[in-house]
Image (tube, rainbow, N blue to C red):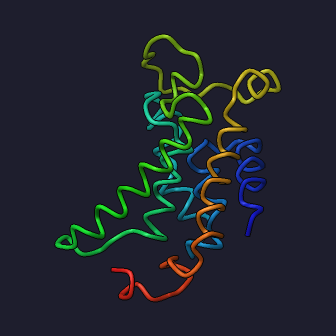
Amino acid sequence: MGSHSKIARELFESGYNCAQSVFAAFCDVTGLDRGTALRLSSSFGAGMGRLREVCGAVSAVFMVAGMLYGYTSPEDDGKKAEHYRLLQEFAFRFKEHNGSYICRELLGLNEYEANPVPEERTKAYYEARPCAGLVEYAAQLLDERILENPDKNCAASGNEKQHA
């Protein structure tokens, strides 16, 4: 625990997208195997399929939060509201720290560019982008929440009914 931010950054710097890097860093907590985590989160990189919308690191935070604190009953409006409050807290803290949670804004892009082809991961790519720091910060937010509320972690407790 606590090293997820380092793992997330290392995954990103080894070529995984932002969402994969954060989501896969928490496999030890979510109980997912790495391959499943990488496939599940692969669609959210570069602002959701390279659409430059919500930052993939933020999307991954939401996915991990769903695994750990999500609800399962469609009738439990109180649990839904509690969960959405948590997600909004993550998003607002990320935005406060980084200026936005929208990929194109974080990258300083003025407009949407419809190009599905990822850029080559070179030294210049990593130097020009804030993404490694963003995935590191996103994972740090999750670690803080997990450490502050260890008993509210559905995946770690193994007792989904208690949290459903």
Q: Residue 118 appears in which quarter of the rendering?
A: top right
> Quadrant of the image for the C terminus?
bottom left
Residue at left offset 62%, top offset 36%: 97
| Front-lying residue, 44 or 66 | 66
Q: Position of residue 3 (x, y in %)?
A: 77, 62
**Quadrant of res 77:** bottom left
**Residue with the most extreme right position:** 123
Q: Nearer the viewer, residue 3 or 56?
A: 3
**In the image, farthest residue toward the top:** 110
Q: Position of residue 72 (x, y in %)?
A: 29, 74
130 vs 152, left or right, is right
Above or below, comparing residue 157 to residue 122 in the picture: below
Q: Position of residue 44 (x, y in %)?
A: 47, 43
Q: Is residue 153 left or right of residue 28?
A: left
Residue drawn at point x = 28 percent, y = 64 percent: 80
Residue drawn at x 76%, y 45% is 14
Figure label count? 0
Of all residues, the one furthest to the left in this rendering is 75
Left or right? Give the position of 44 relative to 164: right
